[in-house]
Amino acid sequence: MALLEVDTIHTYYGKIHALRGISLTVEQGEIVTLIGGNGAGKTTTLKTICGITPAAEGKIHLNGEDITRMRPHEIVARGVIQSPEGRRIFKRMSVQENLIMGAYTRNDQTGIDQDLEFVFTTFPRLKERIAQAGGTLQIDAELVIVKNKFGSLGTIPMQYDQTISTWLERTTH
Ligand SMILES: Nc1ncnc2c1ncn2[C@@H]1O[C@H](COP(=O)(O)OP(=O)(O)OP(=O)(O)O)[C@@H](O)[C@H]1O
Ligand SMILES: [Mg+2]
Protein backbone atom coordinates (compact mmCIF):
# COMPACT_ATOMS: atom_id res chain seq x y z
CA MET A 1 0.00 0.00 0.00
CA ALA A 2 1.29 3.46 -0.92
CA LEU A 3 2.04 5.99 1.83
CA LEU A 4 0.17 8.70 -0.06
CA GLU A 5 -2.20 8.24 -2.95
CA VAL A 6 -3.61 11.31 -4.69
CA ASP A 7 -6.25 10.27 -7.20
CA THR A 8 -7.59 12.67 -9.85
CA ILE A 9 -8.10 15.69 -7.60
CA HIS A 10 -9.79 18.93 -8.70
CA THR A 11 -9.41 22.10 -6.63
CA TYR A 12 -11.03 25.51 -7.13
CA TYR A 13 -10.41 29.02 -5.86
CA GLY A 14 -13.95 30.29 -6.35
CA LYS A 15 -14.49 29.91 -10.10
CA ILE A 16 -10.79 29.34 -10.85
CA HIS A 17 -10.24 25.67 -11.63
CA ALA A 18 -6.67 25.39 -10.31
CA LEU A 19 -6.15 21.60 -10.22
CA ARG A 20 -7.65 19.56 -13.02
CA GLY A 21 -7.30 15.91 -12.25
CA ILE A 22 -3.90 15.61 -10.51
CA SER A 23 -2.77 12.12 -9.51
CA LEU A 24 0.42 11.06 -7.78
CA THR A 25 1.67 8.34 -5.49
CA VAL A 26 4.33 8.47 -2.78
CA GLU A 27 5.69 5.16 -1.52
CA GLN A 28 7.22 4.72 1.93
CA GLY A 29 10.77 6.20 1.98
CA GLU A 30 10.41 7.68 -1.49
CA ILE A 31 11.22 11.31 -2.38
CA VAL A 32 8.83 12.74 -4.95
CA THR A 33 9.35 16.14 -6.58
CA LEU A 34 6.67 18.28 -8.21
CA ILE A 35 8.01 20.34 -11.10
CA GLY A 36 6.04 22.93 -13.07
CA GLY A 37 5.97 26.51 -14.26
CA ASN A 38 4.55 29.43 -12.27
CA GLY A 39 0.88 28.93 -11.64
CA ALA A 40 0.99 25.26 -12.66
CA GLY A 41 -0.53 24.18 -9.35
CA LYS A 42 2.37 22.89 -7.21
CA THR A 43 1.46 24.90 -4.10
CA THR A 44 -2.24 24.15 -4.56
CA THR A 45 -1.47 20.42 -4.78
CA LEU A 46 0.37 20.57 -1.43
CA LYS A 47 -2.35 22.73 0.14
CA THR A 48 -4.99 20.27 -1.04
CA ILE A 49 -3.10 17.29 0.40
CA CYS A 50 -2.86 19.19 3.72
CA GLY A 51 -6.57 20.07 3.71
CA ILE A 52 -6.04 23.84 3.40
CA THR A 53 -7.78 24.06 0.01
CA PRO A 54 -9.85 20.85 0.03
CA ALA A 55 -10.41 18.95 -3.21
CA ALA A 56 -13.83 19.39 -4.78
CA GLU A 57 -13.43 16.07 -6.60
CA GLY A 58 -11.06 13.12 -6.38
CA LYS A 59 -9.63 11.21 -3.43
CA ILE A 60 -6.56 11.40 -1.21
CA HIS A 61 -5.52 8.40 0.86
CA LEU A 62 -2.81 8.31 3.51
CA ASN A 63 -1.76 4.79 4.53
CA GLY A 64 -5.07 3.61 3.07
CA GLU A 65 -7.15 6.07 5.10
CA ASP A 66 -9.32 8.57 3.23
CA ILE A 67 -8.12 12.06 4.26
CA THR A 68 -9.83 13.98 1.42
CA ARG A 69 -12.34 15.73 3.67
CA MET A 70 -10.28 15.97 6.83
CA ARG A 71 -9.44 19.28 8.47
CA PRO A 72 -5.77 20.40 8.34
CA HIS A 73 -5.16 19.72 12.06
CA GLU A 74 -6.48 16.16 11.67
CA ILE A 75 -4.08 15.60 8.76
CA VAL A 76 -1.15 17.07 10.73
CA ALA A 77 -2.00 14.70 13.58
CA ARG A 78 -1.50 11.82 11.11
CA GLY A 79 2.07 12.96 10.41
CA VAL A 80 1.69 15.02 7.24
CA ILE A 81 3.78 18.13 7.77
CA GLN A 82 4.29 20.98 5.35
CA SER A 83 7.34 23.17 5.57
CA PRO A 84 5.89 26.60 4.72
CA GLU A 85 7.31 28.60 1.84
CA GLY A 86 7.86 32.36 1.86
CA ARG A 87 9.43 32.51 5.36
CA ARG A 88 6.08 31.88 7.00
CA ILE A 89 7.36 31.43 10.49
CA PHE A 90 6.22 33.12 13.69
CA LYS A 91 8.35 36.24 13.39
CA ARG A 92 8.09 37.46 16.98
CA MET A 93 8.74 34.06 18.52
CA SER A 94 12.32 32.87 19.01
CA VAL A 95 13.98 30.36 16.70
CA GLN A 96 13.68 27.75 19.44
CA GLU A 97 9.98 28.50 20.00
CA ASN A 98 9.34 28.22 16.26
CA LEU A 99 11.00 24.80 16.22
CA ILE A 100 9.06 23.65 19.28
CA MET A 101 5.78 24.76 17.63
CA GLY A 102 6.50 22.12 14.98
CA ALA A 103 6.09 19.48 17.68
CA TYR A 104 2.83 20.77 19.15
CA THR A 105 0.96 17.53 18.42
CA ARG A 106 3.63 15.41 20.16
CA ASN A 107 4.20 14.60 23.81
CA ASP A 108 7.29 12.36 23.57
CA GLN A 109 9.75 14.83 25.12
CA THR A 110 12.78 12.57 24.55
CA GLY A 111 11.94 12.20 20.86
CA ILE A 112 11.37 15.96 20.54
CA ASP A 113 14.76 16.68 22.15
CA GLN A 114 16.46 14.19 19.81
CA ASP A 115 14.80 15.78 16.78
CA LEU A 116 15.85 19.28 17.91
CA GLU A 117 19.42 18.01 18.25
CA PHE A 118 19.16 16.55 14.73
CA VAL A 119 18.05 19.95 13.40
CA PHE A 120 20.93 21.71 15.18
CA THR A 121 23.45 19.16 13.87
CA THR A 122 22.14 19.67 10.33
CA PHE A 123 22.00 23.49 10.63
CA PRO A 124 24.68 24.46 13.20
CA ARG A 125 24.19 28.21 12.61
CA LEU A 126 20.60 27.83 13.84
CA LYS A 127 21.80 26.63 17.23
CA GLU A 128 23.81 29.83 17.65
CA ARG A 129 20.59 31.75 17.11
CA ILE A 130 18.03 29.88 19.22
CA ALA A 131 17.16 32.90 21.36
CA GLN A 132 16.85 35.27 18.42
CA ALA A 133 13.40 36.30 17.11
CA GLY A 134 12.53 34.26 14.01
CA GLY A 135 11.79 37.41 12.02
CA THR A 136 15.36 38.67 12.43
CA LEU A 137 16.93 35.66 10.71
CA GLN A 138 16.84 37.44 7.37
CA ILE A 139 18.79 40.59 8.21
CA ASP A 140 22.33 39.24 8.02
CA ALA A 141 22.84 40.46 4.49
CA GLU A 142 23.10 44.08 3.34
CA LEU A 143 21.24 43.43 0.13
CA VAL A 144 19.77 40.29 -1.41
CA ILE A 145 18.17 40.44 -4.85
CA VAL A 146 16.71 37.19 -6.13
CA LYS A 147 15.14 37.30 -9.53
CA ASN A 148 14.94 33.78 -10.81
CA LYS A 149 13.85 31.21 -8.24
CA PHE A 150 15.68 28.38 -9.96
CA GLY A 151 18.68 30.21 -11.38
CA SER A 152 19.69 32.02 -8.20
CA LEU A 153 19.55 29.35 -5.56
CA GLY A 154 23.29 29.63 -4.84
CA THR A 155 24.35 27.22 -2.13
CA ILE A 156 20.81 26.18 -1.25
CA PRO A 157 20.92 23.06 -3.49
CA MET A 158 24.07 21.95 -1.63
CA GLN A 159 22.34 22.48 1.71
CA TYR A 160 19.34 20.55 0.42
CA ASP A 161 21.65 17.77 -0.74
CA GLN A 162 23.28 17.65 2.68
CA THR A 163 19.95 17.72 4.49
CA ILE A 164 18.44 15.02 2.31
CA SER A 165 21.50 12.74 2.66
CA THR A 166 21.49 13.22 6.45
CA TRP A 167 17.77 12.54 6.53
CA LEU A 168 18.15 9.45 4.33
CA GLU A 169 20.98 8.15 6.52
CA ARG A 170 18.85 8.68 9.58
CA THR A 171 15.65 7.12 8.23
CA THR A 172 17.29 4.10 6.63
CA HIS A 173 19.25 3.03 9.74
N1 LIG B 1 -5.46 32.31 -3.44
C1 LIG B 1 -5.73 32.16 -4.75
N2 LIG B 1 -6.85 32.68 -5.30
C2 LIG B 1 -7.13 32.51 -6.61
N3 LIG B 1 -6.38 31.82 -7.47
C3 LIG B 1 -5.26 31.28 -6.98
C4 LIG B 1 -4.87 31.42 -5.60
N4 LIG B 1 -3.70 30.75 -5.41
C5 LIG B 1 -3.38 30.23 -6.61
N5 LIG B 1 -4.31 30.54 -7.55
C6 LIG B 1 -4.30 30.13 -8.97
O1 LIG B 1 -4.24 28.72 -9.00
C7 LIG B 1 -3.35 28.25 -10.03
C8 LIG B 1 -2.25 27.39 -9.42
O2 LIG B 1 -1.42 28.22 -8.57
P1 LIG B 1 -0.30 27.66 -7.61
O3 LIG B 1 0.04 28.76 -6.69
O4 LIG B 1 -0.74 26.36 -7.04
O5 LIG B 1 0.87 27.39 -8.65
P2 LIG B 1 2.40 27.04 -8.38
O6 LIG B 1 2.73 25.90 -9.30
O7 LIG B 1 2.65 26.85 -6.93
O8 LIG B 1 3.12 28.37 -8.90
P3 LIG B 1 4.50 29.07 -8.43
O9 LIG B 1 5.60 28.35 -9.15
O10 LIG B 1 4.34 30.47 -8.93
O11 LIG B 1 4.59 28.97 -6.94
C9 LIG B 1 -2.85 29.52 -10.74
O12 LIG B 1 -3.67 29.74 -11.86
C10 LIG B 1 -3.04 30.59 -9.69
O13 LIG B 1 -3.25 31.85 -10.31
MG1 LIG C 1 3.93 27.80 -5.52
Image: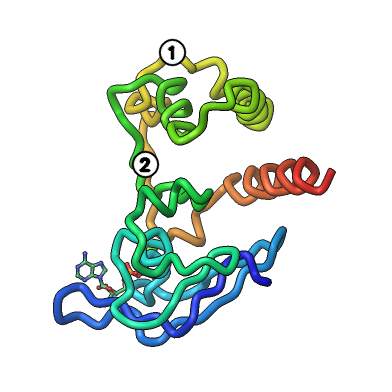
Q: Classify the position of the N terminus by image quarter.
A: bottom right
Q: Could you classify mark 2 by the number of other residues whose Cα lies within 10 Å: few (under 14), some (14-19), or many (20 or more)?
A: few
| Residue depicted at 43% across the width and 65% down the height | 67
Across and down, in percent, residue 2 comes to 65, 70
Residue 45 numbered tag: none
Mark 2–mark 1 Cα distance, whole angstroms, equals 18 Å
| Residue depicted at 55% across the width and 73% down the height | 5
In the foreground, 88 or 141: 88
Q: Could you classify mark 1 by the number of other residues whose Cα lies within 10 Å: few (under 14), some (14-19), or many (20 or more)?
A: few
Q: Quadrant of ligand 2?
A: bottom left
- The residue that label 2 is drawn on is 87
Query: Residue 172 vs residue 124: left or right?
Result: right
Which colouring convention does the figure follow?
rainbow
Query: Residue 135 vs residue 31: left or right?
Result: left
- The residue that label 1 is drawn on is 131
Q: Looking at the picture, does residue 63 appear above or below residue 109?
A: below
Query: Is the shortest distance between ligand 2 and the CB of mark 2 under 8 Å?
Result: no
In the foreground, 35 or 55: 55
The amino acid type found where label 2 is placed reads: Arg
Write down the quadrant of residue 22 in the picture.
Answer: bottom left
